[in-house]
């Protein structure tokens, strides 16, 4: 079971890790501010859930390219250099949002351009940040360091959106974006103060051949492939965040604060759920357990669209977040036993493309459905489609139902990676 209290010993022992971690706290919250602000601004300007959804589609291509290329780049370059460059690039993208918001008549197109650029740079940043960790702490502290990074992401996932709802109403969108730019400045200083983080052996060539080897292995592992596809099913059909602004204004009769609460609720559930994931490593049939978690996710999301009570909606979103983090731990367990060590990095990069890309496809699906039949329809129909999709995938991939490879403890570091990936999936902020 994940520990209730994270060991802070790595922060005392490793000053360079302490700097990276502190910078990540600040920039993680800042990224959540921008996530909520962009969605709210897009809906405020257009009153169109489709436009909000299309923002996710615009980010998808750069994110996939950045994460796949960034994985090989992190094994070829000094990782400190990659982190410094990505902080500058992401800050510049958010600065573009701030400038646009400050104009007398802000335009919609900068929302697409700036968030797409930021997503691409985020994809490059993630593998370099993950690969830097073992070079900053000793082997004995890697697990606790991952836990500390995970706690940063899950806490930011709760605090950031709630704070965004307050700040948007109090100081306006321009100030919120400017705050995020400042947080990247702090993260930049933290990264610049790190030592050189050169990959072992001076680095390996990055390129297409390295990626193809990972894809070839994934294709041959049907159970592993099924875990990727079932997660896409959950995120594409059951991730309604693109309609949160419309729900806040229409269904719940609120404003920016309610928008912030809706974005924060799944993260709160994920944070609570991460404390009770010990059962996941004892599940004998992990494939069935994954399917059950996705069904819980779909049912909870579907009910949000049917019950017009804010407190109930927040509770259901939290339940969905808890189910997602359990699913992530189970999927990580399957990956740990299905992927040889020399391919773990490339398959982890591919998995990040799935967990970060799926919600963006979900933005398009829910935004389009809401534009056709209203936001409530988009939510409950997406939850229903998610549940139906599980049935289809169990038939298409019988390996999910018959998997009996569980029952072995998941390494603590792998469990914390899974929780971090779930937080990334739910929050789309700076990954842990």
Image (cartoon, rainbow, N blue to C red):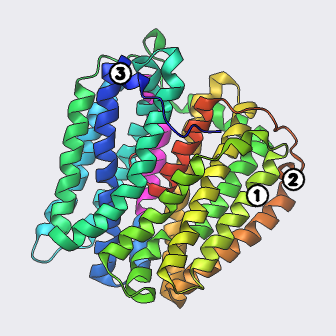
Closer to the N terminus: mark 1 or mark 3? Answer: 3
Determine which quarter of the picture holds residue 41: bottom left
Along the horizontal axis of the image, is 304 left or right of 32?
right
Residue at left offset 40%, top offset 42%? 152
Closer to the N terminus: mark 2 or mark 1? Answer: 1
Along the horizontal axis of the image, is 337 left or right of 183?
right
- List x then y, in percent, for residue 323: 64, 58
Evaluate if marks 3 and 2 touch, with contact meaning CB atoms under 8 Å apart: no
- List x then y, in percent, for residue 137: 43, 18
Tell me the number on the disc at residue 401.
2
| Residue for badge 1 | 291
Q: Quadrant of the C terminus?
A: top left
Along the horizontal axis of the image, is 393 left or right of 52?
right
Closer to the N terminus: mark 3 or mark 2? Answer: 3
> Element under label 1?
helix
- Residue at the front extreme? 5
| Residue for badge 3 | 12
- Label 1, label 3: how far apart the Cα atoms are: 41 Å
Evaluate if marks 2 and 1 touch, with contact meaning CB atoms under 8 Å apart: yes
Q: Which residues make up the magenta segment?
A: 56-76
> Element under label 3?
helix
> Element under label 2?
helix
Residue at left offset 75%, top offset 32%? 337
Residue at left offset 37%, top offset 17%? 13
Does the magenta portion include 63? yes
Depth check, mark 3 against mark 2: the one in front is: 3
Evaluate if marks 1 and 3 touch, with contact meaning CB atoms under 8 Å apart: no
Residue at left offset 26%, top offset 43%? 89
Disc 1 packing (10 Å; few <14; some 14–19; many ≥20): many
Tell me the number on the disc at residue 224.
none
């Amino acid at each position: 079971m994940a520990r209730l209290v994270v060991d802070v010993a790595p922060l005392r022992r490793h000053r360079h890790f302490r700097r990276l971690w502190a910078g990540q706290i600040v920039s993680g919250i800042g990224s959540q501010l921008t996530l909520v602000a962009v969605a709210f601004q897009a809906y405020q300007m257009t009153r169109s859930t489709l436009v909000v959804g299309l923002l996710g589609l615009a980010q998808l291509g750069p994110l996939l390219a950045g994460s796949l290329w960034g994985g090989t780049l992190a094994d070829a370059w000094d990782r400190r250099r990659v982190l410094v460059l990505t902080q500058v690039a992401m800050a510049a993208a958010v600065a573009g949002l701030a400038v646009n918001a400050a104009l007398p008549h802000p335009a919609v197109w900068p929302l697409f351009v700036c968030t797409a650029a930021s997503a691409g740079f985020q994809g490059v940043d993630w593998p370099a940040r993950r690969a830097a960790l073992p070079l900053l702490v000793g082997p004995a502290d890697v697990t606790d360091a991952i836990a500390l990074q995970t706690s940063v992401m899950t806490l930011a996932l709760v605090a950031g959106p709630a704070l965004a709802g307050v700040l948007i109403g109090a100081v306006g969108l321009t100030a919120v974006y400017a705050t995020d730019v400042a947080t990247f400045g702090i993260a930049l200083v933290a990264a610049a103060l790190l030592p050189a983080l050169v990959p072992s052996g001076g680095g390996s060539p990055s390129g297409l051949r390295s990626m193809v080897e990972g894809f070839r292995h994934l294709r041959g592992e049907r159970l592993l492939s099924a875990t990727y596809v079932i997660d896409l099913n959950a995120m594409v059909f059951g991730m309604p965040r693109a309609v949160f602004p419309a729900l806040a204004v229409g269904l719940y009769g609120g404003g920016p604060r309610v928008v912030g609460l809706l974005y924060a609720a799944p993260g709160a559930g994920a944070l609570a759920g991460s404390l009770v994931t010990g059962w996941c490593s004892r599940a004998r049939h992990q494939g069935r357990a994954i399917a059950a978690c996705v069904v819980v996710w779909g049912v909870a999301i579907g009910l949000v669209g049917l019950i017009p009570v804010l407190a109930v909606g927040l509770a259901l979103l939290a339940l969905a977040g808890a189910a997602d983090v359990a699913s992530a731990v189970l999927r990580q367990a399957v990956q740990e036993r299905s992927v040889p060590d020399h391919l773990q990095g490339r398959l982890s990069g591919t998995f990040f493309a799935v967990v970060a890309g799926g919600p963006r496809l979900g933005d398009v699906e829910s935004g389009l459905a809401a534009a056709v039949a209203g936001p409530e329809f988009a939510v409950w129909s997406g939850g229903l489609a998610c549940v139906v999709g599980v049935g289809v995938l169990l038939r298409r991939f019988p390996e999910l139902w018959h998997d009996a490879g569980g029952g072995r403890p998941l390494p603590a570091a792998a469990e914390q990676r899974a929780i971090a990936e779930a937080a990334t999936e739910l929050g789309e902020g700076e990954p842990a």
